[in-house]
Image: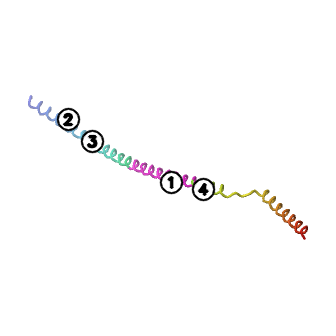
Amino acid sequence: MGLTNFIVSCSLEKSKVKSQKSKFKIQNSKFKIQKSKVKSHKSKVKSQKSKVKSHKSKVKSQKSQVKSQKSKVKSQKSKVKSQKSKVKILPPPLRRERKGLRRVNLNLLEILMEGIE
């Protein structure tokens, strides 16, 4: 009777070990699936980081271009301002007055010429 109890207890232990082994296999496969998901997620994050980095560099480049263009515009404005200060254009009313003065001067000149003759 002791031998049969031993055999029964051994077979029970064997079945326990088998069930534990199958549970371990299931856990192992779940772990592998989880690991592959994590790996996939990491690669996606890495890809997004590189995209962000690329975008940042583009933005930085565009900002520097805008800054350069602003400075060019500023220098052109200053050139135009200096040219405007060099060229003094009389406003229209003064031009008319000058034309009128020329006519008066011509009339005076004619009168003087008549007086001389």
Q: Picture quarter containing residue 6?
A: top left
The residue beneath circle 4 is 79
Question: Is tag 3's residue or tag 4's residue first in the polypeptide sequence?
Answer: 3
The residue beneath circle 2 is 16
Image position of 111 (left or right of 53): right
Q: Is residue 64 magenta?
A: yes
Frontmost of labels 3 and 4 is: 4
For disc 1, the neighbor class at 10 Å (few under 14, some 14 to 19, many from 20) is few
Q: Amino acid at mark 1?
A: Gln
Residue found 45% across the figure and 49% down from its top: 56
How is colour applied across the structure in the image? rainbow
Frontmost of labels 2 and 3 is: 3
The residue beneath circle 1 is 65
Foreground: 61 or 98?
Answer: 98
| Secondary structure under the numbered disc 1 in the rendered image | helix
Image position of 45 (left or right of 87): left
Question: Is tag 2's residue or tag 1's residue first in the polypeptide sequence?
Answer: 2
The segment highlighted magenta reads 47-74
Label 2 and label 1: CA atoms lie apart by: 73 Å
Question: Is tag 1's residue or tag 4's residue first in the polypeptide sequence?
Answer: 1
Q: Is residue 57 magenta?
A: yes
